[in-house]
Structure formats: structure tokens, C-alpha cells
Image (tube, rainbow, N blue to C red):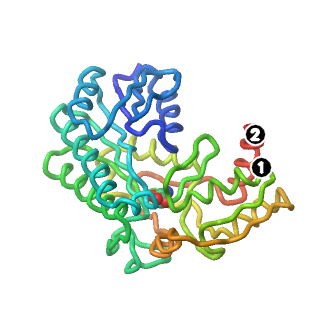
Amino acid sequence: MTSDRILLTGAGGQIGAVLTEALRETYGADHVVATDLKALGPQSGPTEILNALDAPALDELVRKYRITQIYHLAAILSATGEKDPMWAWNINMTSLFNVLEVARQREVAKVYFPSSIAVFGREAHRNNTPQFEVLIPETVYGISKVAGENWANYYFRRYGLDVRSMRYPGIIGYQSMPGGGTTDYAVDIYHYAVQHKPYECFLRADTRLPMLYMPDTIKATLQLMEAPSDCLTVRTSYNLAGMSFTPEEIAASIQKEMPGFQISYKPDFRQAIADSWPATIDDSAARRDWGWQPEYDLDAMTRDMLYHLKLKY
Ligand code: AKB
């Protein structure tokens, strides 16, 4: 049995909900403590209510469960963050500092901090965006992720804290709903399709963005966290790619399975955010350092999403 004890913040979120279960399969249900702002429903392992802004409460849980790894997933995403930038900055940065400090002080062995393609802005190359690229983000979320990446690197170099990170593209899964992101349309669209409803997309038909299916997301996260420390050459955050598509292309992929599906377009403020992000990403550093290799393309994801959502509805 493993001696690792893992704590997740934001465990009720889109990725947190699925990652918690995957970690429990690997490390044992009792070894994974799922925390969130609101009470999580009954689960196979321990759950706690935690506001990640509350440093003493976080410290108490780390001591209580003798935590050896923290996955810090709680964050305000790109679209919600723009509605109240100072509030989003405070949540994203204060919670990260609380995690880094408790990890340093309590000698937590590893920390996972997800970054995002939101770190890039319009000055970055839009296609095959390199690992080491100019980072001038245009959302408060992106600014907080650039700052977070640099703090992760700082804690690694200054204190030897083993912080690991990757830049998630838009994440798509059937198990949980995203909240407040610019890439959320790519989840919503499948829910509309299986309910035989037409979908009005908040991005233009030709907006190409990098995306990743949930099984690949979980695989990448676990792979990075399990990689030997001396293989990791990037201590800010790894670029990560799975597929890239436009709303028009995801609609066409759904139509191959459900020919009657209809889509229309009404871009809103999220279009400007999407326009500042890359279309495709160069993730060769992740492939080289820890063997990253995605499995799903758009059509394989569509078949799997529709299959699972049809069972759900
Ligand atoms: C968002 O759209 O804000 C997120 C992200 C790409 O980080 N899904």
C-alpha cells in the first residue's frame, strides 16, 4: 500500500471530480482527500469543506491527514474572471500562495498546479505555439497563471519544492460540467446534441482552439506527477496538446453521428478571449521529458461523448 496521501482543492470542479476518482484508483480511496468550497456528495474516500483562501484551515487538513501531495485545482477561469478581475486575481493568487507555503512548511513532497493556454496572448505565435514563448495574456485568469507558473518555478529553485504544472487546453468530458471558461462551448454542445436541441455557439464558426478529452487529461496529469523529477526540464509549466478544432468542425463531427444536429453562432465577449489564444500548441517538451502521447482525436471523442451522454439523459 502506498504511503502517499493526496489532497485536492477544487475537487468538485470539472477536472477535480474525475481526477479524484482516478487518484483513488491508483493510491487507494482512503489516501485521497477531496476538498471544495461546498460539501461534496457521498464518495468512496474522505471529503472536507475547504476554502483554499483560508491558510490555517488548509494547514490543519495537511497536518490531520499527513498529506504528501497537493493537487491545487481551485481557480476562477477566463470568462468568469473578466467579470470581476480583482476578485479573480485574489482567489487565484492567494489560494496558490497558501498551497505553496503550506507545502514548503509541512514538507509536502509534490504539488500539482494546472496552468492554461490562457498564458498566451496575441503576441505569441498562434500556430504550433512554442514551449518558451512571449507571455502577454489578455485575461486576469491568464495573468494569474503566468504569475503562478513563475512562482512554481521560484519555489522549486529557491526551496526545492517539487511543483509540477502543465498548460491545459480546453478540457472536454461527459462526467462533469466546466464553469466559467471560454472553451466551455465544446462541452455544452454535446449536451444539446443528445437532447436533440439546436446549439447557439458563443464563438465564431472558425475559431480554432486547442482541446483535450478528459481521459487524456487524466492520463497526462498522472504521468507528469509520476515522472522522475530529474527528467523534468520545465519547472514553469509544460505545453500540452491533444487536438485542435473549430465550432464548425465539432458540429460536423457530431453530425456524422446525429445528422439532424443544428448549430448557429452568436459570438459574445468570449470571442476576444479566444482570439488571443493559440490555435495549435507545440508540446514536444512534454513528449520528450515524460512521454506524453494523446490518444483521442475529434471523432473518437465525439463517439465516446455521445455514447456516455446518451446513457446519462
Ligand atoms: C478556460 O476556457 O478558461 C479554460 C482554459 C483554457 O484554461 N478552459
Q: Nearer the viewer, residue 306 or 53?
A: 53
Q: Position of residue 130 (x, y in %)?
A: 40, 72
Q: Position of residue 206 (x, y in %)?
A: 63, 76
Mark 1 residue element: helix
Q: Is residue 72 above or below residue 144?
A: above
Quadrant occupied by the C terminus: top right
Give the labeled residue for mark 2: 313
**At 40% from the left edge and 40% from the top edge, which residue is drawn?**
226
Q: Position of residue 161 (x, y in %)?
A: 21, 43
Q: Position of residue 144 (x, y in %)?
A: 31, 59
Q: Residue furthest front?
A: 84
Note whether ligand 1 is within 8 Å of mark 2.
no
- CA neighbours of label 1 inside 10 A, class few (<14), some (14 to 19), many (20+): many
The amino acid type of the residue labelled 1 equals: Val
**At 43% from the left edge and 32% from the top edge, which residue is drawn?**
38
Residue 194 is labelled as 1
- CA neighbours of label 2 inside 10 A, class few (<14), some (14 to 19), many (20+): few
The amino acid type of the residue labelled 2 equals: Tyr
**At 66% from the left edge and 74% from the top edge, which residue is drawn?**
205
Which quadrant of the structure image shows residue 167? bottom left
Is 243 on the left or on the right of 122, as rendered?
right
**At 28% from the left edge and 25% from the top edge, which residue is drawn?**
61
Residue 178 is labelled as none
Q: Is residue 169 visible?
A: no
Mark 2 residue element: loop
Q: Are marks 2 and 1 in contact (CB under 8 Å)?
A: yes
Which quadrant of the structure image shows residue 198? bottom right
Note whether ligand 1 is within 8 Å of mark 1.
no
